[in-house]
Image (tube, rainbow, N blue to C red):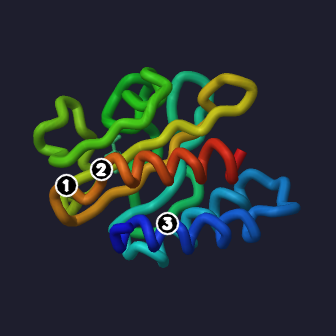
Amino acid sequence: MTDKEAKYMEVLPQAASLLEGETDEVARMANLAALLHGAFGFWWTGFYRVMGDELVLGPFQGPVACMHIPYGRGVCGTAWQRGETVVVPDVEEFPGHIACSSESRSEIVVPVRRGGRVCAVLDIDSRELATFDDTDRHYLEIIVYNIFK
Ligand code: SME
């Protein structure tokens, strides 16, 4: 098991107990963002929520960020449009990437679904290139689809 997998194995039960019994979506997003951010030391960790035809900034940890992202725009809007996780090893290679912070080098965005529709996205940024891979996709999808749901 890699160090990264071991860290996710620690975080999974923490996320489950943190969210258990809490029904308020903002409270859940806020604490899940804080848990992931603290455990892994990411540069930016947070949620954007679907509001009509755009994403609006939700609970997050890290530097200030753009507050509105149109459908299909940037990595977040693309993950919403595709309805699937998008892993970006180098943000400069992603057409239309929205640079909220010039420090961000790589990114992963996981859509959150409610009733079959994307209602939010979990967005995580790193200051290193190629931070995120299939291990992150796998465990973050477990967290978002099975624990956060
Ligand atoms: N880079 C994102 C915008 C959000 S910030 O990274 C927090 C994007 O291209 O959608």
Q: CA distance from mark 1 to mark 3?
A: 18 Å
Q: Determine which residue is flagged by label 1.
A: 130
Q: Quadrant of residue 12?
A: bottom right
Q: Determine which residue is flagged by label 2.
A: 133
Q: Earlier in the sequence, mark 1 or mark 3?
A: 3
The residue sitting at the left extreme is: 93
Q: Quadrant of residue 73?
A: top left
| Badge 2 residue CB within 8 Å of ligand 1 | no
Q: Amino acid at mark 3?
A: Tyr
The residue sitting at the front extreme is: 1
Image quarter where the C terminus lies is top right
Question: Residue 34 at what x, y percent from top left?
Answer: 56, 71
Question: Residue 70 at what x, y percent from top left?
Answer: 42, 28
Question: Residue 71 at what x, y percent from top left?
Answer: 44, 24
Q: Is residue 63 visible?
A: no
Q: Earlier in the sequence, mark 2 or mark 3?
A: 3
What residue appears at the point 59 percent right and 53 percent down from the top-left corner? 143
Res 8 label: 3
The mark closer to the camera, 1 or 3, is 3
Mark 2: few/some/many CA within 10 Å (<14, 14-19, 20+): few
Residues under numbered marks 1 and 2 in contact, where contact means CB atoms less than 8 Å apart:
yes
Task: Tell me the element at label 2.
Answer: loop
- From the viewer's perspective, is 11 left or right of 86? right
Image quarter where the N terminus lies is bottom left
Q: Amino acid at mark 2?
A: Asp
